[in-house]
Amino acid sequence: KGLNKLLYGIRDAELITVTAGSGLGKSQFLREILYGLLKTTDWKIGAMFLEESVRKTARSIMSVHANKMLHLPDTPVTGEELKDAFDATLGTGRVFLFDHFGSLEIENVLNRIRYMAKALDCKVVFLDHISIVVSGQDLGDERKAIDNLMTKLRTLVQELEITLIAVSHLKRPNGNQGHEDGEAVSLSQLRGSGAIAQLSDAVITLTRNSMSEDPTIRHKTKVAIAKNRYSGDTGPACDLVYDVETGRMNEMEQEHL
């Protein structure tokens, strides 16, 4: 609700970037949005989670429906629960996963996005994440590689009239210090020379103090809008509370909204 209030929902031909520090829940955030779209629309959805296998992606998406972490070996689950989770997600025939087989060439990734849109009629494609695509290229200059990829993604989104929700990692602030202490994220901390911020229609930031001794603080993610081309409205959107039992991120609306 907090995101919808500021962004006015999802539109065709838009590139949305989600960013946060390492290990702060970006992939789970995307899965929550993916599941939400499955339940509230009849759209077909493409999912490219490049840091994990298709099996892990499939189980993780099913886990959102089951409210259980099905990808973990010690999670008790019945065959009936597995079937129900599959039927409600992957079994709908509306979710298409990209098996990259270790091949992350930029043109290959772009062609798969085009295939998902043109041949499979996907309205939304999730790309997690930009940094891993450019890291596999032998281009020598990461900034130029990111700028090149973002330009191609922006062009592709306009051509296909899809929504692309992509994850980007951040530069490390102040030398070796990370973003794990809950510090706010700025557009200047996005990787590259500025193309991610410039070419994105919206930039969503996630911050969380993952090192806090207080479990309430440690499991609360603050969601904010750093860029909003559609309405110009930016700032805090909502808080998400991570449930360690279910693996879900549940929205807790901020008091001042």
Image: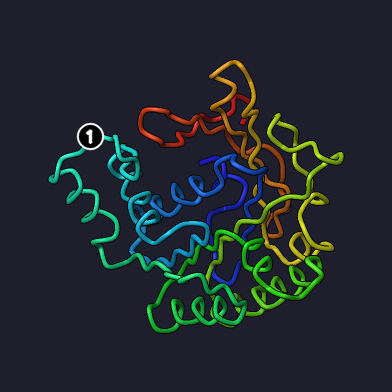
In the rendered view, how is the structure colored?
rainbow
Left or right: residue 73 compared with residue 28: left
Q: Position of residue 10 (x, y in %)?
A: 53, 59
The C terminus, quarter of image: top right
Q: Which residue is mark 1?
A: 76
Q: Residue furthest right?
A: 174
Q: Quadrant of residue 116?
A: bottom left
Q: Relative to 204, is 187 on the left or the right? A: right
Q: Is residue 148 above or below residue 242?
A: below
Percent from the top left, x then y, of residue 14? 61, 67
65 sits to left or right of 150 = left
Q: Position of residue 241 (x, y in %)?
A: 50, 29
Q: Quadrant of residue 199?
A: bottom right
- Could you tell me which residue is drawn at 82 percent across and 70 percent down? 141
Camera-nearest residue between 197 and 73:
73
Q: Residue 8: where, in percent of width, then height? A: 57, 53
Q: Residue furthest left?
A: 80
Identify the residue at image location x=29%, y=56%: 89
Q: Residues within 10 Å of mark 1 (few under 14, many from 20)?
A: few
Q: Amino acid at mark 1?
A: Pro
Q: Residue at x 39, y 83 (%)?
A: 119
Q: In terms of secondary structure, where does tag 1 sit? A: loop
Front-lying residue, 96 or 255: 96
Image point 55% across, 42% down: which residue?
Answer: 25
Count of labels shown?
A: 1
Q: Is 207 rendered above or below residue 141?
A: above
